[in-house]
Amino acid sequence: MTLLRGENDTALRPPAQRQPQPATIPRGVTKGKRASLPFGLAMSLVILAVFLLTVLLEPFLSMHDPFTQNLLARNQPPTFTHFAGTDNFGRDVYARLIHGARLTFFVGVAAVLTALLIGGALSLLTLAGGRWLSDPFFGFIDFVRALPDVLFALMLIVALGTGLSSVVIALGIAFSPFFAYLARAAWRREMAAGYVSAARTFGAGRLQILYRHVMPNIIGTLITMAAVILPRCIVTEAVLSFLGLGVSPETPTWGRMIADATPLFERAPHAVLFPVLALSLLTLSLALLGNHLRAAFDPLRDQGSKTRSGKQARLS
């Protein structure tokens, strides 16, 4: 009786003659069970650490006063005395860049907290209060969302006037719809859950359900959204300052520095390039960190990726 040679030939060989098959390692598992950070995330964390240290150590890192003018040293290129050169009024660009980092970070964080308070906390309270509160509130949120962020912020700043407080309020209201829609989706998801129905059966009120069930399940998602919105707030503040409707002209934020140095770009390109480079690196690192947090802590995003991978496996 002859055996056909083919795929079953390997199985009929003695164990000593079989070729060893290479071991397959599942995706996402590395040798030695070591978890390594992606290169982009690691670089963003390094940039953010340097930025935070610069904000905290600003009085010790600057050798010049960011407001002192020296008209005899205008538009000088970078030297050992002035690391980033001087602007059109002879002010040290490096000192203004470090001082502007603190103001830029303060405006961005304050605007995100304002948006979180208006869009997150206030929307949850209106939802817990009933439709007679939530319908007018989300009608206003829909109106804000229908307008571009920069345009709505411009309208509010024109109405409120220039200054740090006006910029923070305008940006907070302009970006509040992101948190409001997220809070409403979480509220509806939790209200349809079985344990919430059981709590309502035992007499739990809407505010009690909000405190015990909705808030613990949404706080991580809101923090992730805040990390995503923070670079957009910083860029929008820079655009407003560039248009002359942000902070006061003497305040050295990065957007104001770019606006003041742009007309003299051919004579002093360093006065524009340094704040543009700093703004680009900061917003890029914050965007990478926000996307990583959203991919790591958003259960709906993870569930959607698993569903797509399952469909691709069935189709293949």
Image (spheres, helix red, strand yellow):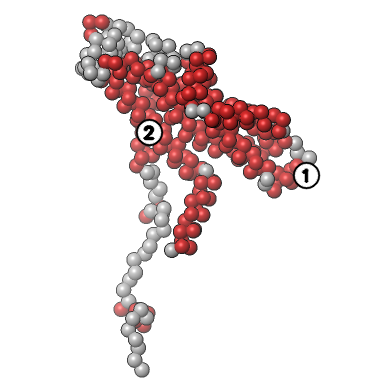
Foreground: 45 or 160?
A: 160
Residue at x-position 37% and y-position 17%? 256
* x and y, in percent, of residue 27 in the image: 41, 56
Residue 288 appears in the picture as rendered: yes
Instruction: Return the x and y of residue 105 as percentages of the image width and height.
Output: 43, 23
Whether residue 110 sits left or right of residue 253 in the image: it is right
Q: Secondary structure at mark 2?
A: helix
Q: Quadrant of the N terminus?
A: bottom left
Question: Which label number is shown at residue 284?
Answer: 2
Q: Give the spatial CA distance, label 1 vs label 2.
A: 48 Å
Quarter of the view holding residue 51? top left
81 relative to 183, above or below: above
Relative height, residue 269 to residue 215 (above, below): above
Relative depth, front residue between 135 and 34: 135
Q: Residue at x 35, y 88 (%)?
A: 3
**Tag 1 secondary structure:** helix
Asked if marks 1 and 2 touch (Cβ < 8 Å), the reply is: no
Residue pointed to by mark 1: 201
- Dot 1: within a 10 Å radius of its alpha carbon, few (fewer than 14), some, or many (20 or more) residues? few
Q: Nearer the viewer, residue 36 or 251?
A: 251
- Point out the tag, 1 or 2, that comes first from the N-terminus: 1
Question: What residue do we see at 41% from left, 58% from top?
Answer: 26
- In the rendered view, tell whether residue 40 sits above or below residue 91: below
Residue 265: x, y in percent? 26, 18
Q: Is residue 221 above or below residue 84?
A: below
Q: Find residue 127 and report its image quarter.
A: top right
